[in-house]
Amino acid sequence: MDDLTFSARRASATAPVRKAEPTDLDARFRTLVQSPLRAGILRYLSSRPDESFDVEALMQTFGRLRLDVENCVRELVDFGVAQVIPGTPARYTAERPGNDALGELLDQFLERSATVSSEDQSPSVQRFREMIGRDEKMLIVFEWIRTAAKSDISVLILGPTGSGKEVVARMIHELSRRSQAKFQAVNCAALPDTLFESEIFGYEKGAFTGAHDRKPGRLELANEGTLFLDEIGDMSLIAQAKLLRVLEERRFERLGGNKSISVDFRLISATNRPLEQFVRDGRFREDLYYRVNAFAIRLPSLRERQVDIPVLAQRFLARYCAAQGLPLDSKAFSKEALELLVSYQWPGNIRELESTVSRAALSAPGRSIRASDIEFLHATIPVLQQSSDRLPSLAEAERAHIIRVLEGVQWNKKEAARVLDISRGTLYRKILEYQLEPEPRQAGNRKGREGEA
């Protein structure tokens, strides 16, 4: 071997090895699966090659709006890794690419472990997805939750009883940067003034009779995490003033102590009360209202999305069967039972629907759940006579009576509660539940404004 040939071989052996440049197909495929939603749908379809799914099913599975899902599946179809089955509605399934190079890229992608997102790790997200039906209202709420979780902004969750306010609060916490710290939930409606300070701020040993040891409060436990104040509309004015001071200074003292403690927490509040009306009536501090209502999320009632009731009922029935160790198809609703569920007003919302389905499944002697197996806790089913005359439901009669009393006392809520023989808290809940408002002619002529609180 001559010196020239030896030198050439030596130079070739010691030269750095260049990596092959990615082909145009490689780059385009990487761009395709760079989107978490496209990648998730592709993995989902590929793991179920014998099944097909419509857009609504994918919307429920991934908790995304229709337009986002439609765009993603269309791009997967255009790329050749999914196919559309024409029909009404159209359905989508996995497709094996005819291009060998693309097939190899797809195989490599599917062999790699999927990145587990924060949403997939969140128990509250999985619970919330069970509350999503065909109506997009809850998907819009999901987008609000994702937005709120990106910052530490104070969030106020509005919605009727049983609509899932605490589930939403936990989702925001679990999707936020504070997810590794504690989530502290406090029910303000169950916390009298005498216990508020010790529960929220904690106390030192000997602060009062029975205080045998130091106890940290919820604020201290929520440091670097999230403090959730449920039913904040029931908080007294004294408690509101103390909470406002903590929000402004981010410092507090334990009951019986003199050491100032710094605290870093994220505040999420929830209420089913009309806080704006409370502010006007002097029942809720205006400065605190603006503090807690930096970002509002409103949960729709079940009545606002009736199309979801059959979907959710079937889902809760399957969960009941699974919890009892039964096959998922061991119980089924009859047509009359589903119609009865849809016609109900659901004052308890999703929580009431789930408990009603469980009771019906337990009561049904056979596989079919009949209308007679369904028992409601509130008798608000519309009752029709055989003739064309319609009798009012209990809810309609109650609503009409409350309006009549409120108008009779010029919307003095204290006096109205006395006449109705109910608490003012119950009256406020009824006003919110039935969406009652004074007539315009009465709005500027209400007597006893100071007696409404």
Image (tube, rainbow, N blue to C red):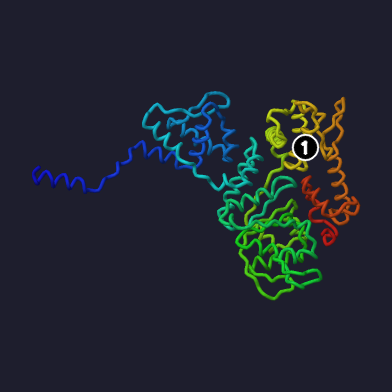
Q: Classify residue 26 by image quadrant.
A: top left
Q: Which amino acid type corresponds to the residue marked 1 in the rendered image?
A: Thr
Q: Classify residue 8 by image quadrant.
A: top left
In the displayed orientation, state which residue is furthest to the left: 2
Query: Quadrant of the image for the N terminus?
Result: top left
Q: Nearer the viewer, residue 436 or 225?
A: 225
Q: Residue at x 57, y 27 (%)?
A: 89
**x, y percent for residue 151:** 56, 56
Vertical comparison of 16 with 392: above or below: below
Q: Classify residue 91 by image quadrant.
A: top right
Disc 1 crowd, CA 10 A, few/some/many (<14, 14-19, 20+): many
Q: Is residue 307 visible?
A: no
Query: Quadrant of the image for the C terminus?
Result: bottom right
**x, y percent for residue 275:** 73, 55
**x, y percent for residue 38:** 49, 38
Side (left or right) of 98 relative to 429: left
Report the residue marked by disc 1: 356
**x, y percent for residue 269:** 68, 56
Q: Residue at x 63, y 67 (%)?
A: 250
Vertical comparison of 266 with 303: above or below: below
